[in-house]
Amino acid sequence: MADSNFIDYVKVLCRSGKGGAGSRHFHRAKYVPKGGPDGGDGGRGGHVILRGNKNMWTLLPLRYRRHIFAGNGQSGSAGRSFGKDGEDQIVEVPCGTVVFDAETGEFLCEVTDDGQEVKLLRGGKGGLGNWHFKSATNRTPRYAQPGQPAIEKTIIMELKLLADVGLVGFPNAGKSTLLSSVSAARPKIADYPFTTMEPQLGIVEYRGNRSFVMADIPGIIEGASEGRGLGLRFLRHIERNAVLLFMVPADADDIKQQYEILLEELRRFNPQLMNKQRVLAISKSDMLDDELKAEIAPSLPDDLPTVFISAVTGEGLTELKDALWRAINDDSNQIEEIPITHRPLDGHHRVREEDEFIFESLPGEESIEEPDEEDYLDDDWSDEDGDTIEDLGWEYGDDEIK
């Protein structure tokens, strides 16, 4: 996977900008004695923003951009001049990107639509200048607020492909062959297990100039939900598919048993997958005659549509497209989609080479240091008039994603 251009898991260090400090300046002019405080407010720090881009299909650009730092806000100046706001960092990601906290594995946010923007890290607010604190009893406030500190967080981005139909099956079940037969995609096809090392997308043409997207997922084996085989790393892509197409070869010892094993692995990975529309395709059916098909039919699951297909001869492909189109346009898929519950990342779901990635500071970069408490105003601070931080319109934020 290291040499592949399809990257669906990256670890990135992000940092928002710190707010600029307020000014403690006093107005000085030749004919204006005791002009009073006129220190301006500091500018806010830059945000780290994620933006969906439908033209991106991989997280490859972020593999070579491990540090994302927003600009710091500038300090205020004389004449109630505001400091310049820090530059925002807008990071374009493919639609279907999910963000987790690298330290705790907690789900933070997701980007699913083109042009959708999510504010990942908020920049620190700029401090108030001393002119905010002047009053009848405090005409020369010699203090101002410092800017809020930056927020630094190490995140993990996962890409979950958006497709109408997802292929689910054991290795060598004929998934790649089917995708190459019904679409223009050209996945690698060979006679050994785990030929497909990365998900493949293909556009399937249907009647009336209509089409739908099909995703070929690497083969799943029993125990994939616990970390066995390659399927675990790609099971997350199935969460985004509207319909699941289970493929079991005709020469399997027990077709129903293999289908139930695949279904159980999906249930263990995410129980919400059980609510998706399902279709069963018996691949390599060119090895069966009508009598064998009649014998196999009673033993097949009766709770979902079943189609005998052969990607080599083209048998049953039209009927399969019809079944998939009906499932895609089923009423349950037309109602408002229920958000996916993303479970936190655990040891099985992490990519070791990414999780052990060590961030090194680039030349000229400053590291975040914890500010001393005395550098900031306390929560119970009040000026000489008794005005608190809230009365002055200032509030300290936190590092939550909003």
Image (tube, rainbow, N blue to C red):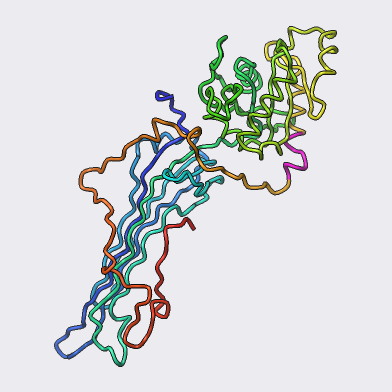
Rendered image quadrant of residue 190? top right
Q: Nearer the viewer, residue 266 or 111?
A: 266
Rendered image quadrant of residue 279? top right
At horizontal 25% and vertical 43% (from top left) the residue drawn is: 361
Hey, which residue is sitting farthest bottom in the picture? 136
Q: Position of residue 333 (x, y in %)?
A: 72, 41
**Mark count:** 0
Q: What segment is highlighted magenta in the picture?
A: 327-334
Q: Nearer the viewer, residue 157 or 368?
A: 368
At horizontal 34% and vertical 40% (from top left) the residue drawn is: 66
Q: Position of residue 210 (x, y in %)?
A: 70, 33
Q: Nearer the viewer, residue 322 or 231?
A: 231
Rendered image quadrant of residue 61? top left
From the image, which quarter does the N terminus lie in?
A: top left
Residue 360 drawn above or below residue 151: above
Residue 331 colored magenta? yes
Residue 372 drawn above or below residue 160: below
At horizontal 74% and vertical 7% (from top left) the residue drawn is: 287
Left or right: 207 as drawn, with respect to 32: right
- SS assignment for the magenta stretch, majority: helix
Q: Position of residue 76 (x, y in %)?
A: 27, 70
Residue 233 drawn above or below residue 110: above
Residue 135 colored magenta? no
Residue 132 drawn above or below residue 49: below
At horizontal 54% and vertical 17% (from top left) the residue drawn is: 194
Q: Position of residue 247 (x, y in %)?
A: 68, 21
Q: Nearer the viewer, residue 141 or 227?
A: 227
